[in-house]
Image: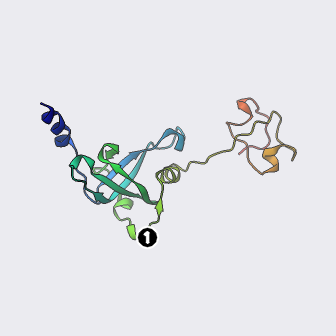
């Protein structure tokens, strides 16, 4: 019975090949609520272990080859979607990047430094204005609408 319980997930496991188009979930901290939540990737290398349950994959995006390896359980299958750019991607011209960098490039995420000023940030006495950092919606503890240093 234990053998059957062990073999059941092995039979259900989807086996991906090189050049398959897949998607990886983008964490909420690396995107805004309006940005896409799935990063489209192409499989460029397969690392098969002794047991087929431990197969890992190296993937590439339009921005580079992700340095981490992923298991099949991390993937969303996107092979039926049309992604001509990914299919025609020249892997040899890409550099290695981290998964977080790939997510932030894909979602065009910009991390903002938060200003805790109370006033309108219009003089160079304010640290944000002095360092040429623009205030955003997360600044002023969400209370100041009179800020003159907006993004």
The residue most toward the bottom is: 92
* Residue at the spot 51% in from the left edge and 48% down from the top edge: 107
How many numbered dots are placed on residues in this image? 1
Dot 1 lies on which element? Answer: helix
Location of the N terminus (image quadrant): top left
Question: Compared to 22, does 63 lie above or below?
Answer: below
Residue 66: quarter of image: bottom left
**Residue 71 in view here:** yes
Residue 95 lies left or right of residue 134; in this view the side is left
- In the foreground, 47 or 104: 47
Q: Residue at x 50, y 39 (%)?
A: 28
Residue 64, position as x, y percentages in the image: 45, 61
- Tell me which corner region of the image, top left, top right, bottom left or bottom right, holds residue 114: top right
* Residue 31 appears in the picture as rendered: no
Q: Position of residue 59 (x, y in %)?
A: 37, 56
Quadrant holding the C terminus: top right
Q: Residues within 10 Å of mark 1 (few under 14, many from 20)?
A: few
Residue 88, x across and y down, in percent: 35, 65
Tell me how the rendering is colored. rainbow
| Residue ID at (31%, 43%) | 73
Check disc 1 and report the residue beneath it: 93
Q: Residue at x 49, y 52 (%)?
A: 106
Q: Within the image, what quadrant is residue 138 found in?
A: top right
């Amino acid at each position: 019975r234990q053998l059957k319980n062990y073999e059941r997930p092995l039979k259900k496991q989807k086996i991906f090949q090189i050049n398959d188009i897949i998607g990886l979930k983008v964490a909420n901290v690396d995107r805004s609520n309006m940005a896409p939540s799935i990063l489209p990737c192409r499989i460029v290398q397969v690392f098969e272990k002794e047991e087929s349950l431990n197969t890992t994959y190296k993937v590439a995006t339009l921005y580079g080859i992700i340095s981490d390896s992923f298991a099949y359980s991390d993937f969303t299958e996107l092979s039926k979607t049309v992604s001509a750019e990914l299919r025609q991607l020249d892997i040899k011209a890409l550099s290695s990047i981290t998964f977080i960098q790939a997510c932030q490039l894909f979602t065009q995420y910009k991390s903002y430094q938060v200003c805790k000023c109370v006033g309108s940030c219009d003089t160079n006495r304010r640290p944000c204005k002095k360092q040429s950092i623009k205030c955003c919606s997360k600044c002023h503890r969400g209370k100041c609408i009179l800020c003159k240093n907006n993004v």
